[in-house]
Amino acid sequence: MLEILQKLVGAERVWAEEPMKGHTTFRAGGCARYLVEPEDAAQLSAVVNACREQDVPYYVVGNGSNLLVSDEGYDGVIIHLFKNMSKIRVEGERMILQAGALLVRAASTACREGLSGLEFASGIPGTVGGALVMNAGAYGGEMKDVASRVTVLTAEGTIREYTKEEMAFGYRRSRLTEEESIVLEAEFALRPGRTEEIRARMEELKEQRVAKQPLEYASAGSTFKRPEGYFAGKLIEDAGLRGFRIGDAQVSEKHCGFVINRGNATASQIAEVIRQVQDRVYEHSGVRLQTEVKFLGWEQTEK
């Protein structure tokens, strides 16, 4: 498989036994059997086809900002869509972005071009592709508010465009949550604005994040989805779990909705904190918290 991947994308863009703690914002987890960085849609399609032909599992990762990889790692191919597929271009009030482009960079580019609408995303650490799959959002804004067109590589290997309506965006979900399609690029419809006002709004949101979120520690951002009618952080605090800790994995004392890595937490410790939070919140309030974080490699370990 290593030889196949090297032939498809070049040896300089394939790594074997690659530590995933260097590719996730939790800074934890074991090694991927292979990590590959395709340069374009053609290489991506070729890698996916090769994995299927060889019956090797694969998983697409951007900035790894919503991912917890098992300490035993992932026995498959990590397809890393990041720097090699991260181009951004602006055409009038439209912004066209490849899947690996960071939202932070996209928001900064929009500000520089005098385009408003992406201010809410200026602190989201993920990439465009991952954000579209889960309809990422913050401070009252979501991907559904700006995405007008999404181009994907389908499970059948064809390239298809989805309109905003066809994306079926919902709370932390889209049609891509269930499909095996992979985001290639997207078009954002923005609106004209004054650069200084856009920058001021971004600074305002930054100050709120610094004041309320444990940005000094590795984490995956908000660990849990917001239950209807509740706030996850409040439920966790009411259950007496502020600061609850196993090793270096901890419920943040600054914001209970965040599970953080204080430095040397293992993925298993983080997962156990998450599990105990879910159980104890359910015991206290009857609400079962659902995670925003995706777990990778755990099923393989159980097998």
Image (cartoon, grey):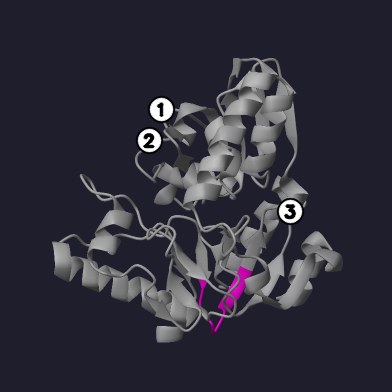
Extent of the magenta region: 69-77
Q: Which mark is residue 43?
A: 3
Above-or-below relation of 182 to 19: above
Task: Determine the CA span between mark 3 and mark 2.
Answer: 28 Å
The reply to whether the C-beta atoms of the residues labelled 2 and 1 are less than 8 Å apart is: yes
Residue drawn at x 62%, y 41% as measured from the top left: 103
> In terms of image quadrants, where is residue 128?
top right
Q: As shown in the figure, which amino acid type bears the numbered disc 2?
A: Ala
How many residues crowd mark 2 within 10 Å: few (<14), some (14–19), many (20+)? Answer: some
- For image coordinates 45% across by 47% down, the residue present is 134
Q: Which of marks 3 and 2 is nearer the N terminus?
A: 3
Residue at the disc numbered 1 = 165
Label 3 CA crowd tier, 10 Å (few <14, some 14–19, many 20+): some
Q: In which quarter of the image is residue 26?
A: bottom right
In the visual, does 114 lie left or right of 290? right
> Is residue 237 visible in the rendered structure shown here?
yes
Could you say where residue 154 lies in the image, as x and y percent from the top left? 53, 46
Point out the image quarter for the N terminus.
bottom right
| Residue 255 left/right relative to 85 | left
Task: Residue 152: tell me if it is visible.
Answer: no
> Nearest the camera: 165 or 110?
110
Tell me the residue that label 2 is attached to: 168
User: Circle 2 — which element?
Assistant: loop
Q: Quadrant of residue 238?
A: bottom left
